[in-house]
Image (tube, helix red, strand yellow):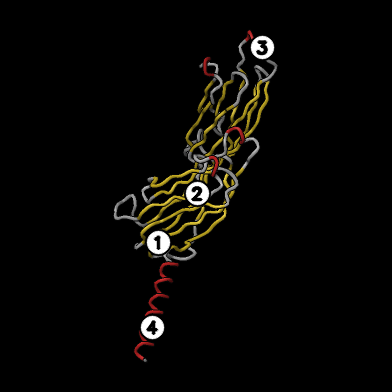
Amino acid sequence: MKTNKFIFFFLFISASLSAYSQNNEKKIVTKVNFTVSATGEKTFNILIPQGTKTVEAKIINQTQMLKVELIGPTNTVLCRNSTWSNLSNWQKPLKCSASIANNKRQKSGNWKVKIIGAVQKSKVDQIKSVSGTLIVYINGHFIENHPLVSEKKSDTKEFSFHIAPKGEVVFTINVPKTAKRIKVEIDKQTQMLKVELAGPTQVVLCKNSTWSNLPNWQKPLKCSASVVNNSRQKPGNWKVKIIGAVQKSKIDQVKSISGKLKVTISF
């Protein structure tokens, strides 16, 4: 009788341990709330310890459409997914996962999760930001409540403008010390334009124009420059000048030009 009780107790403990192991196979490494601009991005670093088998990034409670990328220690994207690719179900959890293997791209170490705003162009004027919750899991060896460190990769500012057919407007952009590049893009222009990007010494480092490409002047107009350690391109106050370039024959008909300016600083 005692033997039967011992066997029953042993089986009960074994079953309990098995259930505990199964229930705890997927551990939450960390959980963090985030906000990104409508088309901006935010990157989180996570240290994946040795002995890990898989890593999974999961986004829940997103307020608008997003993209997510899971990046290994060599900065190779090992998984990408998006809500905008499945419009009818974009509010469902967004998942991305990868195996940990003994190669450079997938070994343990410093991994990244990049979250990118994917708001449709037609809604960017109404929707300024996207928020949600990121949960990262690792299977096998784990560190519970492992911290994620936000790594800011870019900062985007948007402006509206109205100028005369041959007028101009200048925007001053503060470029911080950690910046590596500044990119300017003009979209939704109602007439032909020129754009100039000048560094802190007022030297024009990039110029472009829609009037130089007449059939496609309504396409986005872009200009960019690197931020480096010299007087012309160092951090500080940069300027974006937008100049009306309406043809002389149309000046009497066109009273003003409007559009959207987007300035992105990469770090």
Give, as a three-letter code, the residue at label 1.
Asn
Assign the N terminus to one quadrant of the image: bottom left
Give, as a three-letter code, the residue at label 2.
Leu
Residue 152, image x and y in percent?
Answer: 52, 47
Numbered circles on residues, count: 4
Q: CA distance from mark 2 to mark 4?
A: 44 Å
* Residue with the mark numbered 4: 8
**Residue furthest to the top:** 249
Residue beneath the point at 52% across and 24% down: 207
Residue beneath the point at 66% across and 12% down: 251
Q: Earlier in the sequence, mark 4 or mark 1?
A: 4
Secondary structure beneath label 4: helix
Q: CA distance from mark 4 to mark 1?
A: 31 Å
* Residue with the mark numbered 3: 251
Q: Give the quarter of the image for residue 21.
A: bottom left
Q: CA distance from mark 1 to mark 2?
A: 18 Å
Residue 144's place in the image compared with 149, above or below, is: below
Task: For marks 3 and 4, give the one nearer the viewer.
Answer: 4
Q: Earlier in the sequence, mark 1 or mark 2?
A: 2
Q: Taking 192 as reference, is 22 left or right?
A: left
Q: CA distance from mark 3 to mark 4?
A: 94 Å
Q: Which mark is residue 94?
A: 2
Q: Which mark is residue 139?
A: 1
Pointer 4: residues within 10 angstroms few (<14), some, or many (20+)?
few
Verify CB contact (< 8 Å) between mark 3 and mark 2.
no
Task: For marks 3 and 2, give the one nearer the viewer.
Answer: 2
Pointer 1: residues within 10 angstroms few (<14), some, or many (20+)?
some
Q: Earlier in the sequence, mark 3 or mark 1?
A: 1
